[in-house]
Amino acid sequence: MVSIARKNLFEDLPRFMVAQAGIMFAVGLVTIQTGLLDGFTKSASLLVDNSKADIWVASKDMRYLELTIPLPYERLAQAQRVEGVDRAEALITRGSLWRKNSSAQIDPIRLIGFDPDGQLFTPWRINQGNLSDLKQPYTVMIDRSNLKALDISGIGDTAEISSVKVTVKGITQGIHSIVSSPFVFSSLPNANYYFVSQAMPTGTTQPTTPPALTAKDQITYILVRAEPGQNLTDLKSRLEAALPDTRAFTLEEMAQLNQTYWRRSTGVGFILGMGAAVGVVVGMVVVGQILYSSVSDHLQEFGTLKAMGSSNWYIYRVIIEQALWMAVLGYLPGMGLCLGLSAWTMQTRAIAILITPSTAIAVFGMTIVMCTGAAAFAIRKVTHLDPAMVFKS
Amino acid sequence: MVNPLVTQPQPLTTIEPTPEKVIVAEGLEMIFHSGNQEFKALKGIDLQVFSGDIELLMGPSGSGKTTLLSILGGILTPTAGEVHLLGQEITRLSQNKLARFRLENIGFIFQGFNLFPALTASENIQTALNLKGIRGQAARQHALKLLDQVELADRADNLPRDLSGGQKQRVAIARALAGQPKLILADEPTAALDSHRGRAIIELLRKLSKEEGCTVVMVTHDARIIDIADQVVHVEDGMITDNPSNFSRFAA
Ligand SMILES: Nc1ncnc2c1ncn2[C@@H]1O[C@H](COP(=O)(O)OP(=O)(O)OP(=O)(O)O)[C@@H](O)[C@H]1O
Ligand SMILES: [Mg+2]
């Protein structure tokens, strides 16, 4: 079949390019906004998603990962004794202050204390250094993306966490969250000492090795791995019964809880949704405008087709085919650009624009709907076209 | 598929048959409204056109020729009157049925050629064939044959802008013939051509339509092609007249 649609479209190349720019803009905006939302959501539950626990046990007052009341360390031993628990480990997360030296500026950090020999939570991408190095006293691991923010040039550099001098022993890759201060990983005794030292009278000598945790020391979460075949709902109830003032969550529940909290509290979905909507509206206006003016320029031809006896449907198909060509040829470079941008920001900015295959497919569908929707104006114009105009020259 | 270029064999008969009427129009009136103004462009026209004839519509500018032609082609609906085309009353057909009827029975030729500028000569003809449900390679072959008939086989892949006016109109004739129409309606097909080329085009149109057994109704200002017509109708002020007042102006 001879495609009048395609030939008419490519005949006026500058106009076609303008339309493509409009579509690329719409595709770009929608993809980036969706990508940011997905990146944000992933960020909100990053630590939870990357733990290997079946169940997270928290204070019953916990609202989200960073807003909770500590648990006494003795709960860990109690949890280990609950029937159906294969393994339980303690996790400390606590906001703290970082400074390069005692005269440098302070920066907020999120201190994560964990067991370097443990299995349920460890930093999952270590770029430099070893987990076992964190067993040395007063050591930490930070993420590559935060080196500049924390004023650290590499392994061996030192800084202070609430006046305790620490040494950077390792560097992680891609472990950062837009909803959190920079993560600083350390062993449980180290993390505990950075905290308790704050309450010690000035002049207290620092022990060569921070003491192991005792029953009354404060931890934040207990990560639990169930024995194979355990019903997690039942296990959660048993844990809650055995550990006073706690609530237990499955991994999914805990992740969901954090995502919901951050989406709600920031209204990020609405803001990014608005941005995406602007993209769609602009794309629609541009495509609609271009199709309309293209159809107006070719009115004589549509009139001729009508005189020749083509059905209205044939003419609609010509216009819709133009819209589809525009959609496909605008989407491909638009999405290409977004993927490039996403890769670039991940590398250089630590901003996560997460473009999933389902986003790519959904945006393609949206582009098709947007372009064919925009064709409605042009279709209206030819519907009202009087074929008698073909004899007027 | 029937080859449209081969004339269907006519039954041999010794008695002269009464010629079939392709067009019977009765009491055609056309009133145009613009704002609260009314303008009566046709004031009661009766017309009969016989099968295989070449019929010329002549008359001064603004007399209503194009209006009449549009009504005969089912492109315009008259304010009053009836048009029987090939035995079918068309003025009360729905727009969709009319489009279908035009597709099956009528070919149009325009003063300004009305070729699709982005399509080659062959593709222009193929589009007409596509509308008729002939696609792909079959349409291409068919188009080439038609171009050969209008002596433009070597220009099949040229865009209209690379063709002369006469060549464009020949492509348009081939396109109009592509649907094997029983009726061709042409509005001043030679007006954009010089008189020599104009005459050549009309002669070609006459030859092909006679071969195909196709009836032609043509609006023209050109009195020099009168000899080609089987019948001439003069329109003046929205009416058919037997003694045209200004005919002498065109007489050779
Ligand atoms: N759509 C319309 N609305 C209003 N008036 C119209 C319309 N179409 C035609 N007319 C008027 O009807 C009259 C006949 O027009 P028509 O185009 O049929 O003339 P014509 O004989 O073809 O003239 P020409 O030789 O200049 O082409 C003219 O006065 C014209 O102004
Ligand atoms: Mg006219």
Image (spheres, rainbow, N blue to C red):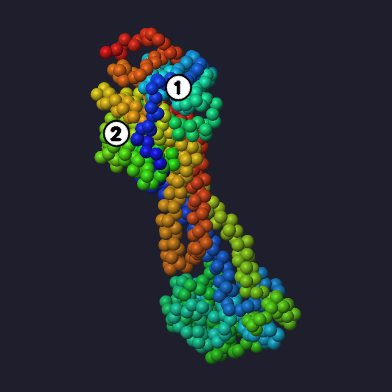
Residue behind label 2 places its C-beta within 8 angstroms of ligand 2:
no
Give how far across and how far down residue A311 sits, in percent.
49, 37
- The answer for which chain carries disc 2 is B
Give how far across and how far down residue A6 sits, in percent.
39, 45
Tell me the quadrant of the picture where the N terminus of chain A can be found.
Answer: top left
Q: Nearer the viewer, residue B6 or B228?
A: B6
Residue under label 2, please give it: B150
Q: Quadrant of residue A154?
A: bottom left
Residue drawn at point x = 29 percent, y = 33 percent:
B150
Count residues near mark 1 (Cα–Cα under 10 Å), then give few for <14, some for 14-19, many for 20+: some
Q: Nearer the viewer, residue B189 or A316?
A: B189
Asked whether, in this view, residue B73 is left or right of residue B114, the answer is right
Q: Which residue is outermost to the front?
A: B14
Between label 2 and label 1, give the one nearer the viewer: 1
Q: Are marks 2 and 1 in contact (CB under 8 Å)?
A: no
Residue drawn at point x = 52 percent, y = 79 percent:
A123
Tag shown at residue A193: none
Residue drawn at point x = 39 percent, y = 16 percent:
B233
**Given the image, on which type of amino acid does mark 2 rest?**
Val
Give how far across and how far down residue A190 sits, in percent.
56, 84
**Secondary structure under the numbered disc 1 in the rendered image:** strand
